[in-house]
Every structure is written in structure tokens, then in C-alpha cells.
Amino acid sequence: MSEARRTIILKVDCEKPERKKIELAADVIRRGGLVAFPTETVYGLGANALNSEAVRNIYLAKMRPMDNPIIVHVARREDVYRLAIEVPEEAEKLMRYFWPGPLTLILKASEIVPRITTGGLDTVAIRMPRHKVALALIEASGTPIAAPSANLAGRPSPTMAEHVIQDLYGRIDVILDAGPTNIGVESTVIDLTFNPPQILRPGGVTYEELKSVLGKVRVHPAAVSKSEVHIEKARSPGLKYRHYAPKAETIVVEGEFDAIVKKVMELARKHIGEGKRVGILATDESLREYGLGVVKSMGSRSDLSSIAKNLFKLLREFDDEGVDIIIAEGLPQDGLGLAVMNRLRKAAGYNIIEAK
Ligand code: TXA
Ligand code: MG
């Protein structure tokens, strides 16, 4: 088990990160410690990606299964050529279009990457985040930084430093707090060892954007599935674990908007009738329809980016308020909706109801 650690929390300016604070955190990374830091997607829990012992401590602090590989964050493109042995043309194109940004590339790993970082795979996941604090930290550390989301395994990803504190205070060395993250869902993970490239996890860069740059791109069936899909171990181990799970039982209601609202209402009444505390994850368009339960809006259906930004925070809020059951409205799957629905379905353990 990971021993108790004294956790230092440092507030950092997200536009002009204070040098001294970044240097302090970078020093912790260089000495093999654990630093939580903001990215444009969610907060990450970082360690020196090339130091096996440091990376091992990430798994312990998060209580993450050791076969679930970790994304390596870089601040310079040159590092990709040290971490990967093959960088296909498509990868270079994607880096030009989307880096820094919420896109993670899966490439064949070079031998400088410890196998604990790749969860035992011969591929490595690499991304360059679009956040000044993250980039400053990686540069100052002088090493690529391995960082999964900074939550306890299975919990919703952290979009604010407060979430990191909830899950990891006393288990890690430093938390850099630069306020809420911008995108709110994690990066898109795309496997370039496949032809055509395959999206393993939908995220901040959309399918439509990738398609317009690459021409051809596939989506792994598990990423869009409405039920648990058996995953070959050798592909993306992360796909097989329960994720983003609030403590409350969660149901997603999918279908046409009007039918969804009717069904959510019916389910809410039924569960309240059974004496349960019900949370409803609604949208701005439906917020006023439900006069019962604890109702929260994810944002407007016409602005899926606002919904992506709020989702994980709201799942945690329902937990804090101790609801017994969360009933969530399904959303359109275009743009960021694909990533949001992927997270919602997983949070619900694929407990999906079709509204007719
Ligand atoms: O936005 C993000 O990606 C955030 C920030 C901190 O960068 N990070 C993040 O990391 O979400 P994590 O560990 O929570 O999710 C990484 C995902 C997992 O599903 C993992 O299985 C997959 O990427 N992954 C990592 N390396 C892989 C590899 N070599 N092959 C296939 N999948 C891989
Ligand atoms: Mg995660």
C-alpha cells in the first residue's frame, strides 16, 4: 500500500504559472514523487514516466490495476521520437493539427519506456496537453510525465483541484491548483498501430475532426457500445474497467428528447414512491419539467461542450448529497456528445433504458 504522505497544495495562476511553484513541483517529479496538475481536459496525477518506481507509486496511490497503461505527457514533439520507435505519417499529421490538445496517440514503444508505464504492452500512449501549467511542469521537470486522471480508480475524473483533494489528499506529494479545467472530459485516445487508425476512447477531439484530417478512421466497438464488450487484453485495457462510477446506482435514458423526459419522470416517480432519494441529470431544455427529486442541469443540448465541462462535477455532487439513484438523460452523439455518452454509459455500468 502507499504510505501516508504530506500533501502540499499550491494555487497556481493558469495563465502565468509562478516559476517558484512550478520549480518546486518539478523538483518533486525529478526526485520520483507524485504531483497532481491541471490539463485542459481533467487533472492528471504525474510522475517521471521513465522512472519505474515513481510510476509504480501512481498505481498504488490511485489503487489502479497494474495492467491499465498510463498516458505519457510531453512538452516537445522531439520527445515522441524518443518514446516511440515508429511514427507513421498520420501521427505526424495529427500532431500538427491537434497538439497541444486533447488527443492521445498510441504508437509502438521504444525501450526507454518502462513496461510498468505501458501496463506491459509494447505500445505507448503520448499526448501534449494544451495547458500552461502542465507544459511548464513538464519542461521544468526535464522528463516526460506519466499521468492518468488524478482520481481514485473507478471514481469520476477530477475537473477541479477539490476533486483531487477528495480522492488523493495524503497519498501524493503536491497538488497544483489552477482552477477548473476547460474541456471536462478526457483526451481522445487513437491507436495508430492500426490501419485505418482506430479511436479507442472518444474524448476532447471529436470523431468528426479526426475524420476530416485523416479521411479514414474507425471507432472501437467498445467505445460506442450500449453494453459491456469483451476486450482483447492486448488492445486497450482501460476499456474493460468500470469507470466514472458514482456511488449511487445510475440509469441512462436514451431515445428522442420528449420520450426521454417522459420516461425520466416515470422512473423518478417510481423510485421516489419506493422511498429513495432520486437525482436527475437533466439539461437546460428539460430542467423545469421535473418538479421532483434533486434536479441538476448538465448544460444546454445545443452546447455539448458545456455538458462535457459539467458532467464529472455533477456526478460527484450527487454522491456528496447522498442520492440513492441517479437518472440521466441521454444526449445526441455528435461532436463531444460521443465522449459524454461513452462516460455516462460507463458511469451507469451500461444500465440503459430506451424511451419509446
Ligand atoms: O485527458 C486525459 O487523457 C487525461 C489527462 C490527465 O491527460 N488522462 C487520462 O488518463 O485520462 P487515464 O489513465 O485516466 O486514461 C488513459 C486511457 C486508459 O483508457 C488507458 O487504458 C488508455 O488510455 N491507454 C494508455 N496507454 C495505452 C496503450 N498503450 N494502448 C491502449 N490504450 C492505452
Ligand atoms: Mg482515468
Image (cartoon, rainbow, N blue to C red):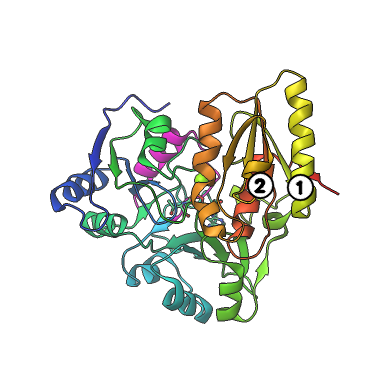
Q: Which residue is mark 2?
A: 286
For the residue pair 86 and 260, the one nearer the viewer reads as: 260
Q: Which mark is residue 260?
A: 1
Instruction: Report the residue at 38% width, 61% height from top.
Output: 129
Q: Is residue 48 left or right of residue 243?
A: left
Q: Residue flagged by tag 1: what amino acid is it?
A: Ile
For residue 241: magenta? no
Please tell me whether mark 2 or mark 1 is closer to you in this view: 2
Percent across and percent down for residue 47 are 34, 46
Percent across and percent down for residue 241 are 63, 42
Q: Is residue 346 left or right of residue 48?
A: right
Percent across and percent down for residue 53 are 36, 41
For residue 70: magenta? yes
**Residue 177 in view in this figure:** yes
Instruction: Report the residue at 76% width, 29% height from top.
Output: 269
**Crowd around label 1: few <14 · some 14–19 · many ≥20 (10 Å):** many
Q: Quadrant of the N terminus?
A: top left
The region drawn magenta spans 48-71
Cβ–Cβ under 8 Å for marks 2 and 1: yes
